[in-house]
Image (cartoon, rainbow, N blue to C red):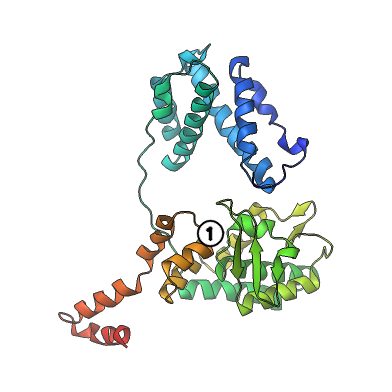
Amino acid sequence: MTGSLPSEDILAIPVRVNRLPDWVREPFCRFMRLRQRNWPAKRVKEHTSHQCRMMVTMILHLNEKGACQDWTDWSVRLIEAYIDDKLREGKAATTINWHLYLFRAFCQFAIDEGYPVPHILTRMKVLDTPKRLPRPLSDEQVLRLEACIKEAITQAERELNRKVAIRDLAYFYLMWHCGMRISEVSALLVRDVDLTGRKLFIPYGKENRDRMLYISQATAEALREHFAIRRRPNSPYVFAGRHGPLTMRYIRDRVEMYGRQCDVPVTPHRLRHTFASQMLAAGMSIVSLQRYLGHDNLNTTMIYAEVSDPLLQKDYYRGAATFDPASAELARQFLD
C-alpha cells in the first residue's frame, strides 16, 4: 500500500466501463480495483480514468473486429489488427505498447481468476521503439526562458498578472533547478517545503518512493516570494487552483506559452532533462543523480550520461587536437 485509499467516489470505475460486455466487465472491475491499491492515493483517480479509457477502447475494438462472444474468441490475429489500426491512426509505438502491457496484465489476471483466456495473449510481443536520447535545452535557451518569465513579472500591467508570473517563475525553477516532474510540482504541499533548510519532501513519487530534494537559492527566493502573495494562502497546495492544486495541463500550457514568446521549444519534462544534463556536466555522480531524480533503475539515469558526458568530451578534444590544431585550445581547457 502506498497510502490511504481515497473516498469511494474517487475509486469508482468510470462509466465508460459499462460499455463492456458482461463477461468482461466484472473481472475487469476487479482487475482495476487491485491496481488501485498499488497507486499513490493522489493519483488513483487520474490513473483509473486513463487506464480504463485505454482498455475499454482496445477491448471494444477486439470484440467488434472479431465478433467476440467469449474469452476464447480473443486471438493474436485480433491483437495484430488492433496494432495495425492504431499505427494507421498515427499512434506512436510507445503509446501502443502501453496498451499491450496493460492488456497482457489483464489477461494474466483473468487466467489467474480461472477464465479461459488463451495463454499466448500474455506473451504478445510489443513493438520495437527507437532509442531516443533526452533533448535538454542549451544554456542560452534556458536563460532566455528564465528572462522571459522575469520580464513578465516586471512588465505586468495588473497586480493579478504579476502574481501569476511570480508563481510561474517558482514552478519553473522547481523543474529546472530541482529536476521535479510536473506531477510532483502540481501535487507539492506547503507542509513539505522547508525554505530555511532549502529542501523539500516528495512523498510517493513516480516510483512509489519518498525522497528529499535540495533547492537552489533562486528557487527558495522564488518560492518565498510566491508564498508572500499567493491568492489562496490557506490552501495546503503550494500551487493552488480553484478546486485543489493547479493541474498538470495548466502548468504545461503556461510553460509552453513562455517558450513560444521567446522561441524556445520547451516542455516541463525537457526542463527536467536540462537539469539532469547540467548536473552531470557539473560533475554530479550518476548514482547521486539517480537518487535525486527518483529513478528506480540506474539504466534510466544512464541515458543522461549519453547526452552529457564530460569524460567523453575531454577524451574527444584531446584526440582531435592531434589532427586539428584549432582544437588544441579546447583540449587544454578540459585538461586544466
Residue 244 on image: x %, y %:
77, 53
Label 1, secondary structure: give it. loop
Crowd around label 1: few <14 · some 14–19 · many ≥20 (10 Å):
many
Q: Is 46 drawn above or below residue 102 in the view shown?
A: below
Q: Quadrant of residue 226?
A: bottom right
Q: Name the amino acid type tagged 1.
A: Gly
State the residue in front, 264 or 118.
118
Q: Is residue 97 visible?
A: yes
Q: Is 295 drawn above or below residue 326 in the view shown?
A: above
Residue 181 on image: x %, y %:
58, 58
- Identify which residue is drawn at 49% across, 57% down: 295
- Residue farthest along the right direction in this orientation: 234
Horizontally, residue 230 falls left or right of residue 185, namely right
Horizontally, residue 328 falls left or right of residue 106, namely left
Q: In which quarter of the image is the C terminus?
A: bottom left
State the residue in front, 215 or 243.
215
Q: In which quarter of the image is the N terminus?
A: top right
Residue 196 on image: x %, y %:
71, 78
- Identify which residue is drawn at 25% across, 75% down: 315
Q: Is residue 90 visible?
A: no
Horizontally, residue 51 falls left or right of residue 306, namely right
Circle 1 is placed at which residue position?
A: 294
Q: Quadrant of residue 199?
A: bottom right
Q: Is 133 drawn above or below residue 279 in the view shown?
A: above
- Identify which residue is drawn at 47% across, 30% down: 104
| Callout count | 1
Residue 220 on image: x %, y %:
67, 76
